[in-house]
Amino acid sequence: MDKRLKRILPRVQKPARYTGGEYNEIIKDTAAVKLRMAFCFPDIYEIGMSNLGMQILYGAINAEPDIWCERVFAPWGDMAEEMRNKGIPLYALESGDPLGEFDAIGFSLGYEMAYCTVLDMLDMAGIPVRSEERTELVPLVFAGGTSCCNPEPMAPFFDLMVLGEGEEVDIEVLRLFQRARDLGWSKTGFLREAAKIPGVYVPSLYEPEYNPDGTLAALKCLDGAPEKVTKRIVADLDSAFYPTKPVVPSTEIVHDRVNLELFRGCVRGCRFCQAGYVYRPIRARSAEKIVELGRETLKNTGSQEATLLSLSSSDYRHLTAACDGLLDWCEPRSISLSLPSLRADNFSMELMSRLQKVRRGGLTFAPEAGTQRLRDVINKNVTEEELLNTCRIAFEGGWNGIKLYFMLGLPTETDEDVLGIADLAAKVLHVWRESSPNKQRGVRITVSTSCFVPKPHSPFQWEAQVTRKEYRRRVELLRGAITAKNVTYNWHDADTSLIEAALSRGDRRVGAAIENAWRRGARLEAWSDYFDFNRWLDAFAECGLDPEFYAVRERSEDECLPWSRVNMGVRTELLLRERHRAYDARLSPDCRAACSACGAQGMLPKGVKCDG
């Protein structure tokens, strides 16, 4: 360890974030490896180490014997200040080597508010933040993750971006890069070849053109770049790599448990949900494989909790079999098994009672909207009767805590819909009074609202976000309507949501505002400790941009969208159809009731069926 580092660690919060040396970390001989990659997560250790995607890619890349992938996280403010003051560059946890010594630097982009942190991490490593300033081939700076489905706002900073699931394509990129480095290719020559790899978007091969009104006119393809870049998927999850020896954190993290992925995709088709569309087609692991992976991972980590993960875990076809197999092994060892992502329309009291024998926590449901009309608009196939019946079953079973999540500002929302949230919470409270066998314990009903953010590749990608003023009015309307002492109301601030929407639907010009905000001090913007709304307004204004142009402006259906060169597997015609059905408050059946012909089936090999 650097002697300077030893001196500053006693002066910062949670020094274990910065030391490495965790159980199951992967150490390799630098003399024996041919390529070194730094896997950067643009948030702090506790968040990054809770991310299953990072654990999967870390293990998959390190499964290549001659490639060493190491982890890098953003330091908290106290550590960042100490490092800058002492001239300590950002380093990887496994070796302690500075990022500047790595061949490739990859970032995971899962949330738009992490964009400034990417620039800050590069700067802390002494690496120019803009791709055009890095004229040499080494280091390669690239990104992957859900936010790459609109690559344009961060296009100025990355040499290339990977679309979709990275287990296979990341290694293909690294192998081509290794060849290019060894043969002395130019950076330009490498990027042209990299653009031929399916799933790779090279920003420098696309040139934006704008209309006089500021809207995007076109994204021109240069040097033979593909007209569309189609995301990559892993077709067979049973044979895919899974980290059964994940790194065990040496300090407390947000989700300190074993994560078991049931399936990818979602059968439901909620119209506001980007993830439900971009993760299609639906692919599931077998129950036998989940039980095998779970037992092996629990043995290798010593964890006392496992969680079954997916976008909607209770929709997994073989849930009972997977849970039974895991519980047979977990219960004698006092290991708890939890199931998030519950739906009110298929809640199983018997299953939840078994899962929470060891520790019974609260239950969380996301009705999203307060009235049936608005739930039909967003295609949330949950009725009030189903939600109340689920709450009744839970209260009768001994639960006394229910969390309900909603969005304000959804398309077509009225004051009646807003007040419907308060009415629904009151009905849940009434159900508890009628059905709880132990009223002495009391009840905790928590209502939380966030501001709707229109996202690319969803049926609501064309919609306007409500203004901050209007969102706050709706918050106050709802706040005044919730009067029961047993019901707590929490709301997300509108300022962050505005910036998130602007970054989510931004074009390449927004990259200048991101850089400007960072140069003004923006980093770790997902944290309220650091987020400064006025700083963002100033950064946009200095670049001649207005965040409301990107966030609160409804897009016309024939407008060229910044993500128009990206194919996430779902046809635009399907998104438009769902948008039109929303305005008629017409439900669409889930994938298992009737195939929507969304196009995602075409991403699977011939003979392989979508599990929807």
Image: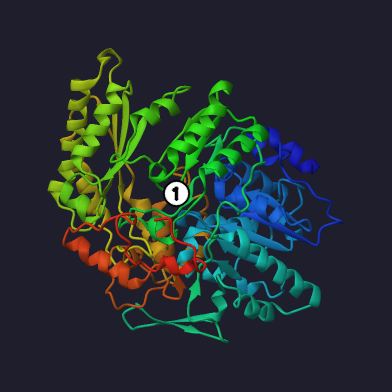
Which residue is the extreme one toward the top? Answer: 440
To which residue does mark 1 refer? 531
Which residue is the extreme one toward the left? Answer: 416
- 205 shown above or below 354: below
Displayed quadrant of residue 546: bottom left
- 453 shown above or below 512: above
- Image quadrant holding the N terminus, namely top right
Which residue is the extreme one toward the bottom? Answer: 223
Q: Judge by depth and name the residue closer to the eye, 336 or 73.
A: 336
- Image quadrant holding the C terminus, namely bottom left
Q: Which residue occupies 28% across, 18% down?
A: 442
Q: Judge by depth and name the residue closer to the eye, 485 or 399.
A: 399
Left or right of 182 on screen, residue 600:
left
Q: Which residue occupies 74% across, 63% down?
A: 103
Is there any visible trace of residue 17 in the rendered image?
Answer: yes
Q: Which residue occupies 66% across, 67% down?
A: 172
